[in-house]
Amino acid sequence: MSFLFFKRCVLVFLCIVMVFSCGIMGISAKENTQNENMKFDCKSAVLMEATTGTVLYEYNPDLALPPASVTKIMTLLLVMEEIEKGNLKYTDTITTSAYAASMGGSQVFLKEGEQMSAEDMIKSVVIASANDAAVALAEHICGSEQIFVQRMNEKAKELGMENTCFENTNGLDDTASNHLTSAMDIAIMSRELIKHEDILKFSSIWMDTIRNGEFGLTNTNRLVRFYQGATGLKTGSTSKAKFCISATAKRRNMHLICVIMGAPSSAERNSIATQLLNWGFANFELYQNPGEKLEPVKVTGGTEDKCHIFTEDFSCVVKMGNASKIEKKYEIPNKINAPLGKCEEIGKILYYHNNEIIGESPVLSCENIDKIDFWGIFVRILSKILLK
């Protein structure tokens, strides 16, 4: 082998190594840039899509931390459930106890014996983060804050909030020893709360008044005024918790929940929430297939010859631009055997993107269909004979 040939081989080998190395460095640099762009100055964060509960971003999602007034999301959830059940009306009069009036921090300065409508109390909690109003509502519903807090913890367990323990209704933590929750758990209870549409009417208000216009309320959530599509929800801050927020916003058909815990300032908290919401709206969209009635299916051996069927709503989060590319495949049998129960699954719809299944929804029966007996068959045959 000549020296010239050997030299050429070495040069080719070195070129290959350099090209390969550049490729690796390029990928690593890109990944590092992406990671750096998604690191924030806070203790934990979660970005969730509200309709499906899909988590788009998370950072220390299950870390149990003091939530400050974000606690009031659970308080408000129980209040709204009482309204939905008819146990509490917006027009009901609530009387302030001495204990409720003694609350410090954010408040509307309720006095012992002062009466206010439930609606004004709720507005005070949602807009001005009033600790005194939160306690007054809890006492009105359960008789004492302590019993109400028990219900808060029961509801947390019911929702699968695994890193949560409430000790009060408002998040004051000077004397609390184990009042904790996580960013993921806050996202879960926020998602549950905004199912009550009235709460968004309150939480999207920038300024309002109570006491016949004599006392002004200004929303503690500045995103309501300065972020496009903001719908609420709740801020919080104490020396232990630092600055926290559960911020909700809706653009197009997608509603996002952004939870930030332990930010160093309100400005940084709002900046992080803004960046995450912007990222979510820029990179994802919600695909929705509304529920519909489908062509009836033949029934064998039943009291009816056919069964009406339907599908429920289906939603999933996809990368931006992919919603229009999703295809549906119906898997429904040509006929089904009786008996058949109402809302029994008899088929399904599969949703595909790039030939991969990304989800499915059931096809259900609209009615009960019993199995036909001897006399049913006899009557059916007889009626056919008579109608000839």
Image (cartoon, helix red, strand yellow):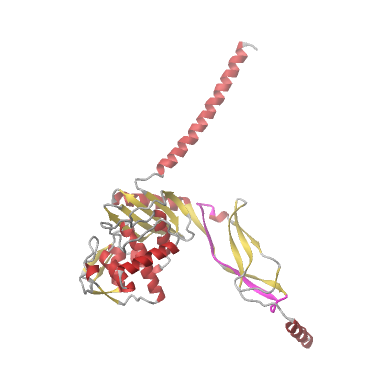
231 or 264, nearer to the observer: 264
Q: In this view, does 364 lie to the left or right of 255?
A: right
User: Quick check: 11 above or below 198?
Assistant: above
83 or 150, nearer to the observer: 150
Observer able to see residue 222: no
User: Quick check: 354 above or below 166?
Assistant: above
Question: Residue lying furthest bottom in this view?
Answer: 386
Q: In this view, does 242 lie to the left or right of 159?
A: left
Question: Is 310 covered by the magenta stretch?
Answer: yes
The quadrant of the rendering that contains the C terminus is: bottom right
- Taking the spot 55% from the left edge, 55% from the top edge, the residue there is 324
Q: Is residue 7 left or right of residue 380?
A: left
- Taking the spot 46% from the left edge, 38% from the top edge, the residue there is 30
Question: Is 63 covered by the magenta stretch?
Answer: no
Q: Position of residue 222 (x, y in %)?
A: 30, 57
Observer able to see residue 316: yes
- Taking the spot 36% from the left edge, 49% from the top edge, the residue there is 272
State which region is magenta. 301-322
- Taking the spot 34% from the left edge, 64% from the top edge, the residue there is 203
Q: Where, by quadrant of the figure, is residue 50 drawn? A: bottom left
20 or 82, nearer to the observer: 82
The quadrant of the rendering that contains the N terminus is: top right
